[in-house]
Amino acid sequence: MSVNLTLLIVMGALYACGIYLILERSLTRVLLGLMLLANATNLLILATGGYSGLAPLYSKDIAAQDYNDPLPQALILTSIVISFAVTAFMLGIIYRTWVLARQDEIQDDVEDLRVAVTPSFDAEDDAEIPEETSEFPVATVVAGGREIPAERAAAEEKPGSNNVAPGPEGVGK
Amino acid sequence: MNIASFAPLAVVLPILGAALTFLLIRHSRAQRAVSIALLSLTLLLECFLLASVWDGGTAAVTIGGWLPPWGIVMVVDQFSSLMLVVSSAVSLAVLVYATGQGMADGDQDAPVSIFHPTYLILVAGVSNAFLSGDLFNLYVGFEILLTASYVLMTLGGTGPRIRAGVTYVVVSVVSSVLFLISIAMVYGATGTVNMADLAIKLGELDQGTKTLLHVMLLVAFGIKAAVFPLSFWLPDSYPTAPAPVTAVFAGLLTKVGVYAMVRTETLLFPGDTLNTPLMVAALLTMVVGILGALAQDDIKRLLSFTLVSHIGYMVFGLAMSSTAGLGAAVFYVAHHITIQTSLFLVTGLIERRGGSSSVDRLGGLAKLSPLLALLFFVPAMNLAGIPPFSGFLGKVGLMQAGIELGTPLAYALVIGGVLTSLLTLLAVARVWNRAFWRSPADAEHPDPVLLAPPLARVAGPGAKRNTVTLLPRTMVGSTLGLVVLGVALTVFAGPLFTVSDQAAEDMLDRTSYIHAVLGEDTVVPMVLTSGGGK
């Protein structure tokens, strides 16, 4: 298959401009970008039809290879109709945006922004819980006839502790 | 005369209905009657189509007397007719729901007179895409359904809907342009757009060209099916539309994308060249989607994220390109269309009864309306994959196929699938706990509707009705119908799985499809896989 270089260059330029335009925030430019993309694609389809030839109207005197390939043109016709409908709809949307907000720009999604600023802290899951969760906290423990703070008693119970607390049972040994 | 010759009616009937309802735009009662009648007729026809291919086989209808590969072909096989029946059943239920809502609310929120013609055109587009045996006709089907969906998405033209609509329209148009570019390139490379013809001619191309075309088509369909990383548009745009519209979009539109991906993978580009990237995409779609769902407070947004996440399961089944995997994927698509749509319909009911779809504002719904709680609970558990529901059966099928495949990546996907299923359960359980179980007074910002005593006159959507009429019978009835259909998928899972497995076998074999379209004496080329054998 051979292709027309001019068509290819025009197509490339249209694609480049189209992609540049749809990255803009202004809706009118986005629409222009979409139109350029659609037209560039139409040129691409045309290019797949190969060399230009005679109109595909059947005549006995014309050899089969002299006709133009009619299928790409039928495809382009369909795609033109579709892009026409989409363009009309987009113009309606742009007008509506202008009526509602007096601006021609794509708005931020409110819910997205809300999720983005929500802190990762969750009151139910991440709140600080006091270490002592018993309903009746123990303050002191009676050991060997004297009261010692619960924390110290717990430390003395741990393995490796040599029970250094001075007290009645330690005296005199 | 074969019943399959009537397949084009599945497209023609809804379009006829659209024309009639457009003429009847000032007579809303006649409009409702016409659209429901024609859609029921379509559903009936599609049931006959499914019955005609239930035991296997493929039928092709050439349109306008142009023989393939030149003319347009419509192909009825098990997969396409199953999709047709499920999609029409779901759209009929949503239509009944929407008319119920329209009768209850009047025309302020959604101008129903425009709704009917547009909705029927959407259904026609979906049917056309499912039946198409031609790449360009598939594109036209996509465009029909997308253009209708643009109108439905921005129904009423309020600020948030226009904002969401712009994202949706621009993303869809770009994906359509990509699809059209791929069609042009396919035509340039092979000189045909007929899918059966392409199945033969694409095989003769060199590997580089083939991979390029393959990737382009998959990207175009991936955007429509919302496969990660092409899925970010979906949770942004779906939740703002009216409840029935979101429901039908969630059920059908992404599945049409999945359907196109399945056809591309099995018919046009058989073999396993892109299976690894597809599997990675499936894993990321599942996990990223469900993590997004966990961060949401709004039920509609949460469901949109679970929708993205569960597309991953279907892509997983497809990427295995084994009969077991593909069969499970086909079953999963049918299951997911029904379940996801019913969940969105229930959310619409929750929004009416509770005044909001945000779990921050909801509470105590289980006590206020036990039926509503049941309607939410059954599909929610089904979605999460709790036994014995169809969601569980579909996931088990996928896991089995994954373990059968036995590669490390397949095991990673199996683990990812189980994880996603558990996280889905967590997401829906959180909604259940907060919206249904706790007392309304415990809600962070309780809606006044919930705190009002029964039969009190309250201001809500549709304003100044008492709390009992917030749930019209038609809306509850149609939702109930869909939930029952979801349960029926569980009850009849056995025969359904047999059909999906057969459909998968036929699709991987390709002979039946190509012979039906191009004639019995066409030579079907062998499929080369790097692993050797299917």
Image: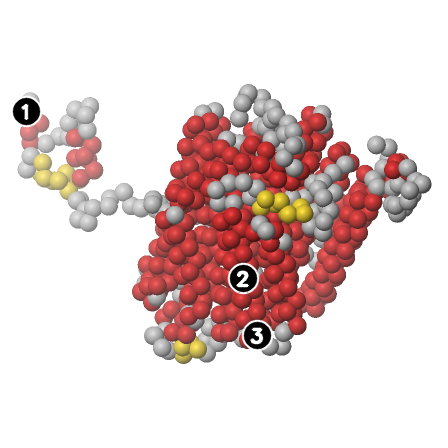
Mark 3 is surrounded, within 10 Å at the Cα level, by few (under 14), some (14 to 19) or many (20 or more) other residues, namely some
Marks 2/1: CA–CA distance: 104 Å
The answer to whether residue A149 is above or below residue B211 is: below
Relative horizontal placement of residue B98, taking residue B426 as reference (left or right): right
Mark 1 is surrounded, within 10 Å at the Cα level, by few (under 14), some (14 to 19) or many (20 or more) other residues, namely few
Q: Name the residue: 44% across, 36% down.
A: B398
Q: Is mark 1 on a helix, strand or loop?
A: loop
Type of colouring: secondary structure
Give the labeled residue for mark 3.
B30
Marks 3/1: CA–CA distance: 107 Å
Relative horizontal placement of residue B374, taking residue A22 as reference (left or right): left
- Residues tagged 3 and 2 counted as in contact (Cβ below 8 A): no
Using the rendered image, report if marks 2 and 1 lie on a common chain: no
Q: What element carries label 3?
A: helix
Judge by depth and name the residue closer to the eye, B248 or B201.
B201
Q: Nearer the observer, disc 3 or disc 1?
A: 3
Give the labeled residue for mark 2.
B41
Q: Nearer the observer, disc 3 or disc 2?
A: 2
Give the labeled residue for mark 1.
A172
Q: Of the residues shown, which amino acid type is indicated by label 2?
A: Leu
Judge by depth and name the residue closer to the eye, B492 or B49.
B49
Relative horizontal placement of residue B506, taking residue B373 as reference (left or right): right
Q: Of the residues shown, which amino acid type is indicated by label 1?
A: Gly
Q: Name the residue: 54% across, 40% down.
A: B57
Q: Position of residue B440 (x, y in %)?
A: 35, 64
Relative horizontal placement of residue A138, taking residue B263 as reference (left or right): left
The answer to whether residue B516 is above or below residue A164 is: below
Q: Name the residue: 51% across, 58% down.
A: B44
Mark 2 is surrounded, within 10 Å at the Cα level, by few (under 14), some (14 to 19) or many (20 or more) other residues, namely some
Q: Where is residue B33 in the image (x, y as percent from the top left)?
A: 54, 71
Can you name the residue that lies furthest to the right here? A61
The answer to whether residue B300 is above or below residue B136 is: below
